[in-house]
Amino acid sequence: MKKILYIMGVSGSGKSTIGNKLSEALQLPFFDGDDFHPDANIQKMSAGSPLNETDRKPWLKLLNKLAIKELQNKGAVIACSALKESYREVLSNKIESEVKWIFLDGDIALILNRLKNRSSHFMPASLLQSQFDSLERPKSAITISIRNNPGTIIEEIIKKLKMKERREFGLIGLGVMGKNLSLNLAENGINLSLYNRQVEGVEEKVAEKFIQEQKLLENALGFEDLALFVSSLSQPRSILLMVKAGAALDELINEMIPYLSEGDVLIDGGNSHYKDTKRRIDFLKEKQIHFIGTGISGGEVGARNGPSIMPSGSVEAYKLVKPYLEVIAAKDSEGKTCCTYIGKDGAGHFVKMVHNGMEYAEMQLIAECYGLMRYGSGKTPDEIAQVYQSWMETGLSSYLLEITIKILKTKEGEDWLIDKILDKAGNKGTGSWTSIAAAELGIPSSMMTAALFARYTSSFKKNRIENEAIHKIHEPRSTHDMDHEILKKAYEFARLINHQQGFELIQAASTAYKWELNLSEIARIWTNGCIIRSSLMEDLVPVLKTSKNILNDADILPNVIKSLEALTEVLHLGLQSRQATPCFSAAINYWYASTNGQSTANIIQAQRDFFGAHRYHRTDDNSETTYHTNWSNL
Ligand code: 6PG
């Protein structure tokens, strides 16, 4: 942005020297205000008389005209004492927002000393006291002590000027994700303002401290005052909110509203519920503020190096934040960004939620394979890691398998760390939201629900131990030798079903909410950066361009048919070795049920009609007519 930099201060403070050097450093023209004084003013000052208001006015106006003219070009550095607020008002008339004040500050003794050594200037030292008397210290200037040498002063001015510039992107919430996203944004050349709330004794000066620790953030500004943070951003503002989803986010939004302006964009990057996102979009729309809800997947490392980003809201708002989100996202195998506009409303958060549901099932399948190998056939964690490694190398590579190999190999002294980790799975809620959404939409997303319930079952550790002591069914059993190729095939097949269920759920929401989601594009942005990235996801990008049902795709179908026997065998082994395999079971049951033209739901319908007169359709009548039988009379 073009600027007029007024170097101000009393006579002898070094305005000409500093102004000249600063103009060289910034490659801007320099004008010394003294050169614009009318002769009468110079004579008056040389005679030892201070200038009065009438003397000064035309001179100040002339400098203001000069500044306006220079703004048509590159801007300029202008040295002028500008001692009083009223003078500064004249100097910045009509160009207030383009003017920056640089105040050269020094005490009278230091300046007197300098003036005594300066014979060429028309201002006698005797006038200095009158200058100090007139000086009204500026409130919003960059104040620089003149004690340092000119080189240091110039460096300091340039640094402070940078700090005064408005930042292009704001981020609120410096938790693990917020911190890593800030570094990612900064590394991509984005000028940041960062805000973190202040909680006495717990979170204090978090943003400032983080900036000081990180070289990458040397140009960033840190705040714990929301008003100042918002005003440090150029408009329309783009602000990424990385705070806890739920009530805390609503509170923050309400707190921010008074400081925001029409056209600003808030981006919620947390794991918010998609219905909350829609509510927030509608609420803020009334205030002409945009709201983008975006799923961000990839955890800490993804946030730093490139996550998968799933934004939704209005297209107009997305256009404003697109450059920032796209530049920080991971890249797919063709170098395209793993960020795409998902759709309107909370579609982005819905898609991220299903991602997490699929993530639960992917994790559970790996855990079930581990259980079968560890407790069914007595393999060590290292041996299991080797099996997984061979799968990785033969067409089944995925991020989750990769990290599990590392986990299994990790030791604490002689012991495997995995054996010291308590077997109670936590969850933050997105898995249950996915199962609830599936139920609401009437979609049988059984694998993610089985994985969720497996986590819940695991959490009852005390009960499990008590029950084990009573039933003794898990006493050491003869181990069987498991064919890892069979397990691999079963795993491969179950993963296909998990992916089919995930995309089926997304498609159902797309139809129900008229989101017009592009399944292939969603798969594409999940090929890198996110937790469920895998070679399978890569394969699904072209498949989902034409097929709605992955399992029926001509290229995938032969694998499905080949793997069915393997899945049956693995389940059999699970039952034999008394290892729970809820996710594998859900997969095969879904497959059997959804490929069977004759289900058993006629019994259900008959029972419903029997006890509740709920009526049924008949196989020998294709119309919409429903029937009721008077069962008790039969
Ligand atoms: C991701 C993850 C991320 C987070 C999960 C964990 O995509 O980066 O899914 O969002 O790790 O929310 O969820 P649970 O605590 O429910 O396992």
Image: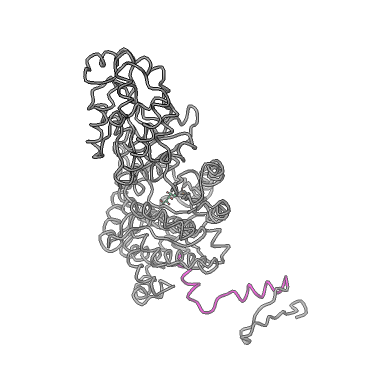
Q: Residue at x 44, y 73 (%)?
A: 548
Q: Is-magenta flag for residue 113?
A: no
Q: What range is drawn magenta here?
A: 587-612
Examine the rendered structure and indicate whether residue 247 appears above or below residue 386: above
Quick one: 322 or 552, which is closer to the camera? Answer: 322
Residue 578 makes an appearance in the image: no
Residue closest to the eye, 316 or 489: 316
Residue extending farthest to the right is 633
Q: Nearer the viewer, residue 501 or 89?
A: 89
Describe residue 184's horizontal placement relative to residue 266 as left or right.
Answer: left
Q: What residue sits 25% from the left and 21% below the top?
A: 121
| Res 370 → quadrant | bottom left
Per the picture, the main secondary structure of the magenta-coloured stretch is helix
User: Is residue 3 at all visible to an observer of this figure?
Assistant: yes
Compared with 365, 180 (above or below) is above
How many numbered marks have been drawn onto this rendered protein structure? 0
Q: What is the quadrant of the N terminus in the image?
A: top left
Protein image colouring: one colour
Task: Give x and y (percent) for residue 502.
Answer: 45, 63
x, y percent for residue 70: 31, 42
Q: Which quadrant of the view contains residue 39?
A: top left
Whether 517 is drawn above or below 136: the answer is below
Q: Position of residue 312 (x, y in %)?
A: 47, 58
Q: Which quarter of the image is occupied by the C terminus?
A: bottom right
Q: Position of residue 22 (x, y in %)?
A: 25, 33
Q: Nearer the viewer, residue 124 or 282?
A: 124
Residue at the front extreme of this rendering: 40
